[in-house]
Image (cartoon, rainbow, N blue to C red):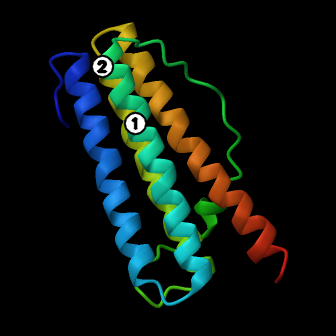
Amino acid sequence: MKEFENINDILDFAINEEQAAVDLYTKLAENASSSDVKTVFTDFAREEINHKKRLMEIKENGLFDMKAESVTDLKISDYTLNVSPSPTMTYAEALVYAMKKEKAAYKLYTKLAERAPNDNLKNIFLALAAEESKHKLSFEIEYDEHILREN
């Protein structure tokens, strides 16, 4: 796992991860064959852009008071199969893919928090993990309301 020298290294890493997510979701939106899937990925790319901006502001202004918060986990992604991104994804598959991606990001930041050399860095990682958990929850709610309840 990557080692970080300071808070700026952490923020640079997180900013790069957010940009990679923006790029991925933008590409998936552009290639989507369904308007519902396109909307899911466009909205999510926009959310990741906002998250990246927030991290950049933290880095520029030196405000490292991100707070971790408790987020409900519906655990829907625990009971779904992995999905590979493709232009022909269904709406349900797009939601599952997004849930799994957010869960992986949550786990990454949680692991980094466990290895943080001090409480300040640990708290930043935990706050980033909470952000990813919120994203996952929004996809789980959407999946529950529009996929599970329809079946």
Q: Where residue 50 sits in the image (x, y, percent)?
A: 47, 42
The quarter in which the C terminus is drawn is: bottom right
Question: Is residue 127 at least partly visible in the picture?
Answer: yes
Q: Is residue 53 left or right of residue 72?
A: left
Secondary structure of the residue carrying tag 2 is helix
Instruction: Tell me the quarter of the picture where residue 107 sits.
Output: top left
**In terms of depth relative to the viewer, which is nearer, 72 or 51?**
51
Q: Is residue 92 left or right of residue 54?
A: right
Task: Identify which residue is drawn at 47% across, 12% down.
Answer: 65
Q: Where residue 10 sits in the image (x, y, percent)?
A: 26, 26
CA gap, disc 1 and disc 2: 10 Å
The amino acid marked with disc number 2 is Glu
Task: Identify which residue is drawn at 62% across, 79% down.
Answer: 36
Task: Identify which residue is drawn at 38% across, 30% down.
Answer: 55
**In terms of depth relative to the viewer, which is nearer, 119 or 124?**
124
In the picture, the disc for residue 63 is none
Q: Where residue 21 sits in the image (x, y, percent)?
A: 36, 55
Q: Is residue 146 left or right of residue 85?
A: right
Instruction: Tell me the quarter of the picture where residue 101 sits.
Output: bottom left
Task: Identify which residue is drawn at 54% across, 34% down.
Answer: 130
Q: Are discs 1 and 2 less than 8 Å apart at CB?
A: no
Residue carrying label 2:
60
Question: Is residue 99 at least partly visible in the picture?
Answer: no
In the picture, the disc for residue 53 is 1
The amino acid marked with disc number 1 is Lys
Q: Where residue 110 sits in the image (x, y, percent)?
A: 43, 33
**In terms of depth relative to the viewer, which is nearer, 79 or 17?**
17
- Crowd tier of the residue under label 1, counting other residues whose Cα lies within 10 Å: few below 14, some 14–19, many 20 or above: some
- Crowd tier of the residue under label 2, counting other residues whose Cα lies within 10 Å: few below 14, some 14–19, many 20 or above: few
